[in-house]
Amino acid sequence: MGELPADRDILSGTVRMAWPSIMESFLVSLVGMVDTFMVSSLGVYAIAAVGLTTQPKFIGLAVFISLNVAVSAIVARRKGEGNRESANKVLQQALLITGGLLVVVSTLCVAFADPILHLAGSQPDTHRPAVTYFRIVMGGMAFNVVSMVINAAQRGAGNTRISLTTNLVSNLVNVVFDYLLIGGHFGFPALGVAGASIATVIGQFVAFAIAISVILKGNGFLKLEFRKGFKPDRGVLGDILNIGLPAMVEQLLMRAGIIIYAKTVASLGTVAYATHQVCMNIQALSFMTGQAFAVSATTLMGQSLGKRRYDMAQAYTSRTRTVGFLFSLILAAIFVLFGGNIVGLYNSNPEIIRIGGHIMLIVAFLQPFQSSQFIVAGGLRGAGDTRTTAMITFVTVLLVRPVFAIILIRMGLGLYGAWYALAADQLLRSALVLARYQSGKWKTIRLRNEV
């Protein structure tokens, strides 16, 4: 098998792979923060309205997110094998699937936005703006989805900087148009919540344009050539579906569970839900390091398995967890010391700041567990072990979190009870994911057409 790289080389490879993803995750979360901050100028109802669209939007994107999991994992293996032609075929087939699904998902989301947002727990003061926001974002989702698939392939090939560049430019465009269209500046109309959604679509179009231009030039491992056609390949489609379908089930279970959870929280009233949404947005910002190192774990795991180096796969996962843990401690300290101040950036309502500051202590406590869970699950997905992660999600997000939230809220704990339920979900999920990884069963998973 050969000797393992030195610890220093493993560590530098992990950081080199992860830092563009850290910056990318930070930018994505920061734009979400800026969106919420700018929308908050319209009132508490606007924060709640935009927040209500989050989970339905991710349900609409679930099939594409799961497709991206498969694309990253398979391209990473092909990269490890040095099989460029097969890697490009994976991207081609993924885009073929994406085109067909886009028409169906986008049409359904736009047509049934009204009942979807009712189901998500909208209130009389939040329903109409939430429907408007959702219809615009999902109507223009094609730009977002295509760039997501291309960037997933680039990450699998180890080209995380390309995805960073794409998101850096598109997010800056998003923020600029947020400023122009939400409040109306420099002659642009003041469109309120609708302006925020239009700005999002414009930013996604820019991401799409950059991703397409890079993949057509093909200066790296991947290059898309339309002249070769987009004929279905049964073997490649089989690999994508074998990994992607369980990942899709996981995404759908997760979003269904979170919608039940969010609807339970929404029943506490607009101020409580706005507080919850602000805290969820800040927690999403804390995902940046865990998710970034998860991307690194997925890619390095897949590439190592492509080389049949199980020892290297374990070494990379171990070092990635260590670095991720150190970052999580820094974030935890920030939330403990400045949690209330961060909440205050979103809204000046004293009640939101008071309760939100307390919830930030829960977010701080969860940081190390959350980081480990992201990274180890990323490694399992890189190995193609998506069925197990789907089952774990079913147990924790669809059962534990919403059931505990309902019980604890009815016990009179209010919004705190909802966050205790979220903590129970995170702790159990972290334990189950780690147990699966340590079992070593991910080493037995095989893909078709491996060299």
Image (cartoon, rainbow, N blue to C red):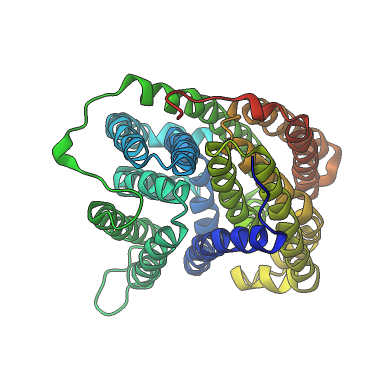
Residue 408: give x, y in percent of width and height.
82, 38
Classify the position of the C terminus by image quarter. Answer: top left
* Image position of 305 (left or right of 7): left
Q: Nearer the viewer, residue 200 or 40?
A: 200
Q: Is residue 371 above or below residue 444?
A: below
- Residue positioned 57% across, 44% down in the render: 298
Q: Nearer the viewer, residue 3 or 209?
A: 3
Report the residue that reaches farthest toward the bottom. 186
Residue 413 quadrant: top right
Residue 436: give x, y in percent of width and height.
74, 31
Q: Is residue 94 above or below residue 235?
A: below
- Residue positioned 52% across, 37% down in the render: 306
Residue 318: give x, y in percent of width and height.
73, 49
Q: Is residue 361 above or below residue 61?
A: below
Residue 336 quadrant: bottom right
Q: Is residue 372 visible?
A: yes
Residue 252: give x, y in percent of width and height.
54, 30
Classify the position of the N terminus by image quarter. Answer: top right
Q: Is residue 281 visible?
A: no
Q: How many marks?
A: 0
- Residue positioned 68% across, 47% down in the render: 317
